[in-house]
Amino acid sequence: MGTLEIVFLVLLGVFGPLYWLNYRKDENLPVALLKVAALLGFVYAVMKGFDWMAAEVPAEEVMTFGEPATEAGPRIPLAANAFTWFAVFILVMITWYARDKFTTVVSLMLSTWDRGNWYVLPVLVVLMTIGLALAAAAASPVLSPFIYTLF
């Protein structure tokens, strides 16, 4: 058992009972733990899938479409950057869900700069990034498992 598995088991041990205590007292503890385990299992499977696709393997194990590979490289070369594109997709979705709030964010940033409080901008950027990510997670059930695991 590696470090990643231990981290996920600790997360299950911590967040399973917390989920049951805070949200689902009407159901029994094993069902609440099973729901948290399913969510964490899905995130774990996605992470392992991306690792499996990008793993360096010998040339005979490289999966190509068309000509066979002649040198070692990622297991699926066309999907080796899938995690990067997945992260870009999540950022685009966050931007899409928060598109109505950008005028407020920009006006807050500009007023902070104009008043000479430019040193506050890094704090505002961090807080707004976290806030936009949480707003997008609340608006989309597809994004929420990936965004909530960041926190």
Image (cartoon, rainbow, N blue to C red):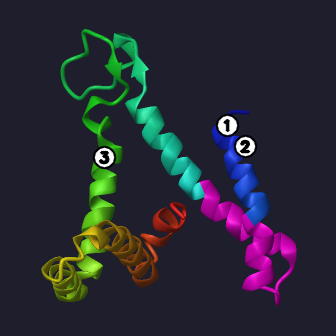
Vertically, is 136 above or below 2? below
Amino acid carrying label 1: it is Thr
User: Residue 141: within the magenta?
Assistant: no
Which residue is found at the position 39% from the left and 73% from the top? 127
From the image, which quarter does the C terminus lie in?
Answer: bottom right
Give how far apart the Cα atoms at labels 3 and 2 are. Answer: 25 Å
Quarter-of-image position of residue 12? bottom right
Q: Earlier in the sequence, mark 3 or mark 2?
A: 2
Residue at mark 2: 6
Q: What secondary structure is marked by label 2?
A: helix
Residue at mark 1: 3
At label 3, counting other C-alpha atoms closer than 10 Å, the crowd grade (few under 14, some 14-19, many 20 or more) is few
User: What is the x, y in percent for residue 130?
Assistant: 41, 71
Q: Is residue 60 left or right of residue 93?
A: right
User: What is the x, y in percent for residue 88?
Assistant: 27, 56
Give how far apart the Cα atoms at labels 3 and 1 are. Answer: 23 Å
User: What is the x, y in percent for residue 53?
Assistant: 40, 34
User: Does the residue at mark 2 contact the one at mark 1 (Cβ under 8 Å)?
Assistant: yes
User: Does the residue at mark 3 contact the one at mark 1 (Cβ under 8 Å)?
Assistant: no
* Magenta-highlighted residues: 15-41
At label 1, counting other C-alpha atoms closer than 10 Å, the crowd grade (few under 14, some 14-19, many 20 or more) is few
Q: Earlier in the sequence, mark 3 or mark 1?
A: 1
User: Residue 34: within the magenta?
Assistant: yes
Which residue is found at the position 28% from the left and 60% from the top? 89
Q: Is residue 142 left or right of residue 101?
A: right
From the image, which quarter does the N terminus lie in?
Answer: top right
Residue at mark 3: 84
Amino acid carrying label 2: it is Ile
User: Does the residue at mark 3 contact the one at mark 2 (Cβ under 8 Å)?
Assistant: no
